[in-house]
Image (cartoon, rainbow, N blue to C red):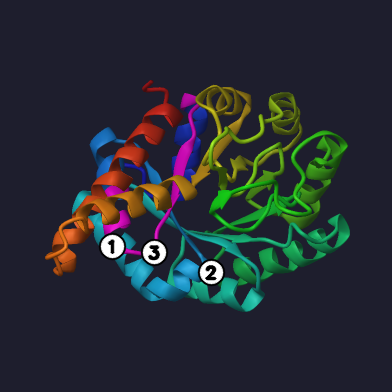
Amino acid sequence: MKIKTLRAALEWAKEREVALGHFNTSDIAAFHGITKAAKELGVPVIIGTSEGEAEFIDLNVAVSMVLDARKELDHPIFLNADHFRSLEKIKEAVVAGYDAVIFDVASEGLEENINKTKEAVGLVKRIDKDVFVEGELGYIGKSSKILEEVPEGAVVSGDALPTVEEVKRFVEETGVDLVAPAVGNLHGMFKNTPNPELDIELIRSIGKSIGVPMVLHGGSGISDEDFRSAIEAGIRIIHINTELRVAWRKGIEGALEDKTQVAPYKVFPASEEGVYEVVKDRLKLFNGML
């Protein structure tokens, strides 16, 4: 593919009315599973590292992995600092070479969120104007894990969700390149039941009122029908993490059933394969191949 920038990838997605898949990783096995699936299907992909994942894998190592894979596979692979919550960490990611950053102060009130996000946008653009900055509006929890109940303080429906006017104001006053409003989504996924349904009409109304792409966080556990409807309504990036972690763990557990096995390079391919299958299925759905 000739797509060289995240901006071009988003334009590509908008033209086709599809969504870019965003998948988190903190190890080489999941990374290979993600990039393999994207290359095989011929679609752009975004790799995400949360603050914790980035600390484990190292910012510079993550950048090197993406640059190497981009060159070796000759494929559009982009790197995002996912839910960074301090200006210091944001700056480190931009200087290291990330393509995009998410400054997340969604748990704070609207005014504080606007003021702090605007400061983050200014910081990033002074360092590198081409790095995308994403803001989040509406608290949807913090952890990509299996849930027993809705996280305390998370907003998933009704009047608690951000209004169209609030999202429009947030975008205009902060100058973000991307926005992730709470629309019924949650970080994490429930163990034995689907996640709450998305407010598709809210997504559609927001999309008509703003001039930047919308991002859907907390994609794990959302129904295929809601994904299709959300993309049709204007979502252009979808985040998946918990599903990958579950697949990664199942792969490791299966490989370790051989109690004599102690070679990591013989264990991790099973987790890579599990992640690859999840990513392939999600990318097919997000790109209208299912």
Quarter of the figure with the N terminus: top left
Residue 130: image x %, image y %?
Answer: 52, 59
Q: Write the residue at 58% across / 75% down.
A: 89
Amino acid tagged 3: Ser
**Residue marked by disc 2:** 51
- Label 2 residue SS: helix
Distance in Å between CA atoms under marks 1 and 2: 17 Å
Q: Write the residue at 86% across / 39% down.
A: 165
**Residue marked by disc 3:** 26
Residue 181, above or below 256? above
**Relative horizontal placement of residue 107, taking residue 125 as reference (left or right):** right
Q: So how many labels did they put on this image?
A: 3
Amino acid tagged 2: Glu
- Label 3 residue SS: loop
Q: Earlier in the sequence, mark 1 or mark 2?
A: 1
Q: Nearer the viewer, residue 175 or 51?
A: 51
Quarter of the figure with the C terminus: top left
Residue 46 shows in this picture: no
**Relative horizontal placement of residue 169, taking residue 43 as reference (left or right):** right
Residue 74, above or below 68? above
Q: Is 22 a magenta residue? A: yes
Q: Earlier in the sequence, mark 3 or mark 2?
A: 3
Residue 128: image x %, image y %?
Answer: 54, 67
Q: Write the residue at 69% across / 38% down.
A: 211
Residue 234, above or below 156? above
In contact (CB < 8 Å): disc 3 and disc 2: no
Residue 60: image x %, image y %?
Answer: 38, 75
**Segment colored magenta:** 16-34
Residue 187: image x %, image y %?
Answer: 60, 49
Residue 64 shows in this picture: yes
Snapshot quadrant of residue 216: top right
Dot 2 crowding, Cα within 10 Å, few <14, some 14–19, many 20+: some
